[in-house]
Image (tube, grey):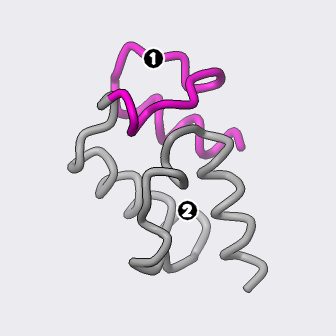
Amino acid sequence: MDEILEILEGLDLDVDFETCDTLVDDGILASLDIVSIIAELSEEFDITIPARDIVPENFNSAEAMYAMVRRLMDE
């Protein structure tokens, strides 16, 4: 989870990523931010994020991203 928070904090947005659960729904993350997050998660955790998982629910919070990463690592 710490790695995901570091990635998000690297976006230099004024957001409390530990508590926010509407990053996509509230337009906090732009599409380019999500592309950057996908690339960094893929590299950091050695996973491939398939198109079916690139949905708002998986990127609305750090916890949602963590759950997705864990699931993909287990596959």
Read off the residue under disc 1.
15
Query: How far apart are labels 2 and 1 at the CA level?
Result: 22 Å
4 w.r.t. 44: above or below: above
For label 1, the SS is loop
Q: Residue at x 38, y 13 (%)?
A: 14
Dot 2 falls on a residue whose secondary structure is helix
Q: Which mark is residue 44?
A: 2
What is the quadrant of the C terminus in the image?
A: bottom right
The stretch in magenta equals: 1-26
Q: Name the residue nearer the viewer: 34 or 7.
A: 34
Q: In which quarter of the image is residue 25?
A: top left
From the viewer's perspective, is 65 left or right of 51? right
Drawn side of residue 21 relative to residue 54, left or right: right
The answer to which quarter of the image holds residue 50 is bottom left
Looking at this view, is 65 or 45 the one in front? 65
Circle 1 crowding by C-alpha within 10 Å: few under 14, some 14–19, many from 20: few
Disc 2 marks a residue whose amino acid type is Glu
- Total labels drawn: 2
Of labels 2 and 1, the one closer to you: 1
Q: Which of marks 2 and 1 is nearer the N terminus?
A: 1
Q: Where residue 12 sits in the image (x, y, percent)?
A: 34, 24
Residue beneath the point at 30% across and 31% down: 27
* Residue at left offset 21%, top offset 49%: 32
Which residue is at a point 49% across and 70% down the rendered structure image?
53
User: Could you tell me residue 57's position as x and y percent?
Assistant: 53, 51
Amino acid type for the residue under numbered disc 1: Val
Overall secondary structure of the magenta section:
loop
Where is residue 3? Give x, y as percent: 63, 45
Q: Among all residues in the image, which is located at the extreme bottom?
A: 75
